[in-house]
Amino acid sequence: MSTQKKRVPAIEGWFVADGTVALLGSQCTSCRSYFFPKESFFCRNPACQGTEFEEVPLSRRGTLWSYTNNAYPPPAPYVAPDPFVPYIVAAVELGTEKMVVLGQVVKGFEIADLRVGMEMELELDTLFEDAENEYLVWKWRPVGTRGGA
Amino acid sequence: MQKDVAILGVAMHPWGKWGRNFVEYGVHAANEALADAGLEWKDVELITGGETIRNGYPGFVSGASFAQALGWTGAPVMSSYGACASGTQAIATARAHILAGLCDVALVVGADAAPKGFFAPAGGERKDDPDWLRFRLLGATNPIYFGLYARRRMDVHGATTKDFARVKVKNSRHGLENPKARYKKAVTEEEILASPIVSDPLHLLEICATSDGGAALVLASMEYARKRTTDPVKIKAVSTVTPTYPNAVIEMPNFATDSAYAVPVPTTPFKDSIAKAAYEQAGLGPEDMSMAEVYDLSTALELDWYENIGLCKQGDAEKILNDGDTTIGGRVPVNPSGGLACFGEAIPAQAIAQVCELTWQLRGQAKGRQIENARAGITANQGLFGHGSSVIVAK
Ligand SMILES: [Zn+2]
């Protein structure tokens, strides 16, 4: 990975990364429901008329709800490296927020390394690069692991 | 039963990759359905169309496209888009008009000419469109979601890849003699498991293709039908429910589920609620069903549907599959047509095609795949973005 490239988020406002990475959700100030991606104008809880939301970082850890992989390059607008390396996508349930959030799993893990119910944590990683920038995104990693499995 | 609507005519253009315009398949099906009903196009008082999709939004207003191709008669038109549920939306619209007394005869048409390979969003930067973003940030194709559900069945219920493969083995046999099916070849467990993995644990032969096809129904009020036939097959229920907040299951094209922090998860999850609403409308239950046509976008997804439509309790789907309950000749055959496994998906036509199959079964016209003494059946599917879809058909 080139160190000269500028590291920029692949999408603005969906996560913060100051030392550790956290997804940015919103919380309704009336009923306290969480939303990711952020809700900004009307609460989706049908029993709530809330229109005010606070931006909140979501739990950085959760339990694995399920997982699968892309064995073949997904179509654009995904920017797939050439040669393509299969990668895992995980659905992780956040305990506090009681919601399931998708993310890629950092490279180096195989399907056989994972199991529903495992504890996972967020990490900042590269989604893709172009000539100037390295585009960053949140990814999941099994808690207590380093590098590949 | 005053909420019954008669099915006077059904027809399908064979599924395949024919390389023609979708209107041609729709017109073919419409004309055959009218002939099946013993009616003519000029008798139709309402045409409803399931819309086909291009460029990330409904690109053709299909109802009028079919009406124009059949020859303008001034008949009122309605067009519906609900992704995979589009056909059910078109059926629901026709049924509601008939039950409201606004018309006696309605023609329902859905047809599609499908693109190759993965469904993918259109070009351009659309950072406020979750369907664009799921591809951009995650590469979350539809098979990714199917893979998540399949893997969860394995880890939670102990399903195996062999169980999944057996769904395809069953459906491939069901469809062998269906003249409308695209794939008419019995496949073995070994062939399926030897095909490349697309999204683990799902193999290429376990994920449905996209197809060209067209299907049509002629629906009529019971009063009108009685003048022409003594024993029409009837639509007893049409369910088009949306989820109830908070929906705790991750669904296409979303990045996250609703949060159950402030409101507990409903006792009936979305996919269960689709059939539940249909059963309540029909005054029937799963035990009354002779058969079902469900959306086997993947093999594992068919097993989820067994539980969602109440054929067995959660976690028992593999058992009833392996016991032969859902095979023709068993307790409640599922996908006697061969399902998406033998058809591939022609999106706006597929939910209508499900009703065609149940109708042929109930009339005793399902040659080579007939379920004996079929009395009633249920269709189930789910359209992207939260479109529930289920129809109950009975003698
Ligand atoms: Zn609220």
Image (spheres, grey):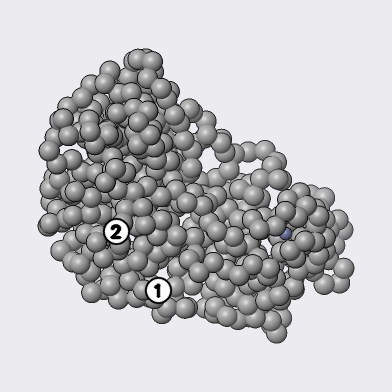
> Disc 2 vs disc 1: Cβ atoms closer than 8 Å?
no
Instruction: Count all numbered tags in the image, as a single digit.
Output: 2
Residues packed near mark 1 inside 10 Å, few (<14), some (14 to 19) or many (20 plus): some
Task: Give the amino acid at mark 1.
Answer: Gln
The answer to whether B30 is drawn above or below residue B295 in the figure is above
Q: Who is closer to the viewer here, B385 or A33?
A: A33
Question: Residue B217 falls in which quadrant of the image?
Answer: top left
Label drawn at residue B284: 2
Mark closer to the chain start, 2 or 1: 2
Which structural element holds mark 1? Answer: loop
Q: Chain of mark 1?
A: B
Q: Who is closer to the viewer here, B334 or A9?
A: B334
Identify the residue position indicated by label 1 in the image. B314
Residues packed near mark 2 inside 10 Å, few (<14), some (14 to 19) or many (20 plus): some
Q: Residue B73 in the image: state x and y as whole percent.
A: 35, 15
Please tell me which residue is depicted at 52% across the width and 34% down the height of the picture. Answer: B58
Please tell me which residue is depicted at 58% across the width and 53% down the height of the picture. Answer: B253
The answer to whether B104 is drawn above or below residue A117 in the figure is above
| Quarter of the image with the N terminus of chain A in it | bottom right
Residue placed farthest to the bottom in the image? A144
Apparent side of residue B183 relative to residue B52 in the rendered image (left or right): left
Task: Give the amino acid at mark 2.
Answer: Leu
